Image (tube, grey):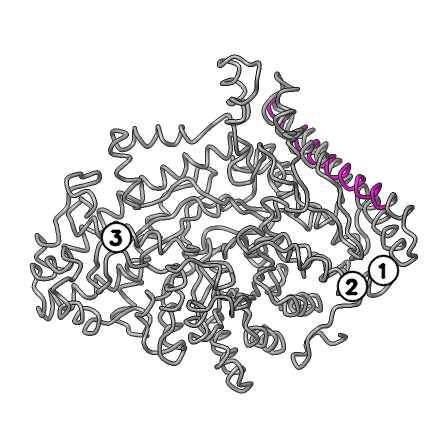
Amino acid sequence: MTDYKRTDVKLEFTPRMAKVKEIIMPRLLPQGAREGTACNLCSAEDKNPMLDVFLEMPDAPHVIAHAHAIVRSWMVTPVLIYPYEAIVGIPRPRYPLMEHFSWGLNNPGVAYEVEGLTKEEQDKLAHRINPLTWDHAHKMGDVLFGSPENYGVVASDSIFSAGGYQGHTIPNYYTLLERGLDGMLEYIDECEAKNNRDQATRDFYEANRIIVRGMSDWLMLYSDKARELAAAESDAEQKKYYEDIAENCAFVAHNKPVTLYNAVQLMWTLAVWDWCDCVGRTDQYLYPFYKYSMENGDKISVEESVTSIMFKIWEFGAHNITMSGVKPEDGSDATNELSYMFLQVLRSIHDVHPRMCVRIHDGTPADLMNLITTIWSEGMSDPSIVGDACAIKGLTDIGVPIEDARDYATLGCQEIEIPGKSNFGCEDGVFNVAKVFEIAMHGGYSSSHPDKIIGPKTKTFLECETFEELFDSFKTQLEYYTRVFCYMCDRGQELRGANFAKLVKTPFTTGCLERGIPHDCGGPLYNYGVVETAGVPPTSDSLVAIKKLVFEEKKISKETLWAALEANFEGYEKERQMLLNMAPKFGNDNDEADSMAVRVLDLFWSECGKYKSVRGDVYTGACSLLTGGIGFGRSMGAMPDGRFAGEPLGNTMGPRPGADKNGVTAMLNSVAKLPLHKGVGGTTLNVVLTTKLLSNPALRESIGATVKNYMVNGGQLAQITTANVEDLLDAQEHPERHGDLIVRVGGFSIQFVQLGRDAQDEIISRYNGESA
């Protein structure tokens, strides 16, 4: 393919890349296991290299032993190079003790399996592996809520989940490619000379050196292996491939990359060491190398370089790639040839990985929108899209300079960060607004613990004489639980900091080396907190129903509604239908319903903004819940919007499944009214655009214009499900027929048949009216 903007034909892989794909296909893992967490290509063989290092270095500071342990785990992993591939490097097998950017070293319990140590020595070893454990957060929770029993009530009520889970961040690939690994070592020395405060700081810098040197040594292992394979290879073509790999790995082990082939190998080295987390704006930082290779030639074609890195991400599941957007320096369109090339490779792979998001703005080229909607029309749920206007405003509003705000990227399951310069937690916790509303209805109690009050005592629903009295009760409860939630989030973040969870990311994150401060302790330039938000649409719909049908029109008495909720609407179907059909719902471009959603969401996210993350900057909102809306819904009783007890709350900031009746445009209009810029941690929306709709070229163009208009006028993130509802229903009955049916959950794509029945039902419930 020479014109990567074309949509009438698909990219055909070169003969070499087609052979690589053929080799990869049989070893692909299911979506959930294909995220860099462990490799199925080699065995741990009863090795425990990280534990070995801690045993060999009993007196070393944690950060030094930790760094050596990480490097050891890579150096003892088998070096595998497959025929025809151009970019090399596989993840490690699952060793008993491993580090992860979410929590640090993952299994301190291995200390108690070491023979010959006393119990006291085992305790000491476990503490050296994990200086801080979850007991720290639990004990602080016991104190905060008055007793372990009270904290247990809060935890079991699914009010919130605090302390973080994934902890995604994007390393600074710009810096890596500009300096090279030897250049990074020189820069570490420069920064230490300016920040030589104490021994702990010197240990910090030495740990960073250990990591960077380890990457160079690992690349040389692959270079040596490739030379060994080349020497034994009789086929001249394959021999040349091995020789190219050997030369490429040896070059980038100690030199700044020059060609695109150099750059993608060095990029992949950091990506795989970083647990295949998130790789940022690849079309931007690789573009100078693309231009060089186009003008001066390369060992492989630029298309093969792009295909090679995409194949690695396809197999090992990096969490997100960001395309297009605007340039940091002047805000002009940043779309380039690589943007189209990456999308065409994604299109030809046609799978749930790689995950990709395209940034949309007023100047987004029509050719790019056409390619995106064409990919959707072929049954893909990637790429998702994100609006520059909303994201950039949200970032500048919280203090990010405009140049860095323009350089934002998506990561994880639809979060937003400043690549290589930030740590937004991603996420610091998840908060169930609907559960707090339920507690407010009960005057401070929850339906699951009616004899136990944890927070403030407020008026019950039955005691409220006006709607505003009820809303005041809700506000009081929300303020209390937001405060304690943010406090508990900070305790979880202290674990990450004490355990050096992001040691591999640290030397490649601007601010950490310059300040001499670890990644999770406020080292990066920007350290905002991120609060994933559940249950806003059903809460606002419930408030509208109460306001309209109980207090204003008096069509349902307080006592009758209370009895209906307590009975989960058994015997009250008439009242339930009134709640469903006589009160407007968010998602239908109805100002009465939408303004309540704005009021609820603005209240919560503004409250979050009153508190600073322990890393140093304020908390911001977000909503990308994976399947969390299903789990949080299970803990809930019936709600005044007509929702039965236990039903899902929804996994994005869109209307509750089944509530939107007026089509996609009305739904987009409703969501665009929300203060999405305050949810700049990443607030996504499920959009159903079926292949039936997208198969019509004229309609596809109109749909592209509609979603672009949404993004330009305040929309933030949108993820697309393109499957037809008839196919989804048939797949539930005949899963063997639909192995390639791709859908979008709350932040990732997956084959529909790999989901549990409750998640399948939630997706089917999104289909309404014309969208189905």
Asked if labels 2 and 1 touch by Cβ distance under 8 angstroms, the answer is yes
x, y (%) of residue 497?
51, 33
User: Is residue 23 or residue 446 the one in the foreground?
Assistant: 23
- Which mark lies nearer to you, 3 or 2? 3
Secondary structure beneath disc 1?
loop
Give the residue type that dot 3 points to.
Met
Decide if residue 657 is on the left or right side of residue 31.
left
Q: Residue at x 46, y 69 (%)?
A: 734
- Distance from disc 3 to disc 1, alpha carbons, whole Å, reads 59 Å
User: Is residue 458 or residue 224 the one in the foreground?
Assistant: 224
Decide if residue 448 is on the left or right side of residue 167.
left
Secondary structure beneath disc 2?
helix
For disc 1, the marked residue is: 298
Is 449 contained in the magenta span? no
- Which mark lies nearer to you, 3 or 1? 3
For disc 3, the marked residue is: 636
Give the residue type that dot 1 points to.
Asp
- Dot 1 surroundings within 10 Å: few (below 14), some, or many (20 or more)? some
User: Is residue 142 or residue 391 the one in the foreground?
Assistant: 142
Asked if labels 1 and 3 touch by Cβ distance under 8 angstroms, the answer is no
572 w.r.t. 93: above or below: below
Secondary structure mostly seen in the magenta stretch: helix
